[in-house]
Amino acid sequence: MTVVETMEHLGAPLHRVRIERDGQEFALIPGGAVTLGFDLNAWQPSPAQAADYAESLGQGFGCGSDLRAHLAHVLSPRRSVTLATVLMAVEDEDLTEPPADMPAVLAARGLRMPSSDEWEHGCGAGTDTLFRWGNDCPLDRIPHGDRTGPHQQLSGFGLRIAHDTYRTELTSDVTAAHGGDGGESVCGGYGSMLAWLPLATANRNPSMAEFAYGPDGEGLCEDFSTRPVLTL
């Protein structure tokens, strides 16, 4: 089954295409020359964002002297890449084997793990903001358990992605983890801004990737997921 929807995205019509394959729904992710990453030089935190991060920093959380320094540590830089057009699963799926074994598991189904660039493109769909919906996030609450927040919207290409910080998606890049932090920021009481940041489009969460692929992550494959891709 193929479904085509036309919607407005970034001020222009966008055709969302969804295809069902073996009972799993995929979205068409157009390729070509795309710009990914986040341009910190063109961004300023709001006073509320800066204050929220400063409060978290005072409690021992964060990895930079201010929010900009923290983001420089976790976000991928602005860059231009060329990607192929692919079909990407609308929903991520839990790993059934350790991360190193998942390429073979998916290959048996004619699928593969996405690259980090493909994941970021699928999530952001051409946006250049911190989150796929904009630069702001509701600082009066955390995303987990919030059923009405902007993170519940589908991405521009129709993916249900970066919507739950307890979901941590892995790609073919062993240095990156996307879309969540396994609930670390929520359970740890890191503060609102740090609780939303795992959902940032360009967040590659290097410390979570190190955990997932390191000895501490052994035997915890069910706590991670991936988003299968079908190469066209």
Image (tube, grey):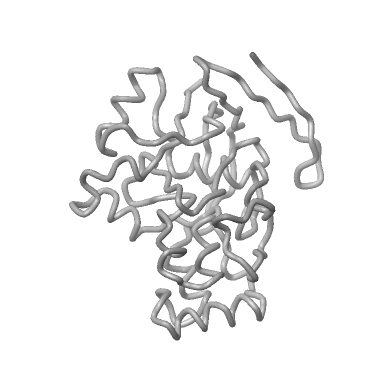
189 relative to 11, above or below:
below
Foreground pick, 87 / 139: 139
Q: Quadrant of the N terminus?
A: top right
Q: Residue at the spot x=24%, y=50% of the render? A: 217
Q: Residue at the spot x=52%, y=74% of the render? A: 68
| Residue 210 on image: x %, y % | 28, 55
22 relative to 38, above or below:
above
Find the residue positioned furthest to the left: 215
| Residue 34 on image: x %, y % | 59, 43
Foreground pick, 115 / 140: 140
Q: Residue at the spot x=44%, y=35% of the render? A: 114
| Residue 67 on image: x %, y % | 52, 76
Q: Quadrant of residue 173?
A: top left
Q: How many marks?
A: 0
Q: Is residue 101 left or right of residue 3?
A: left
Q: Is residue 113 left or right of residue 13?
A: left
112 relative to 81, above or below:
above
Q: Is residue 200 left or right of residue 1?
A: left
Find the residue positioned furthest to the bottom: 58
Q: Residue at the spot x=57%, y=64% of the render? A: 142
Q: Quadrant of residue 125?
A: top right
| Residue 74 on image: x %, y % | 44, 63
Foreground pick, 114 / 77: 114
137 relative to 122, above or below:
below
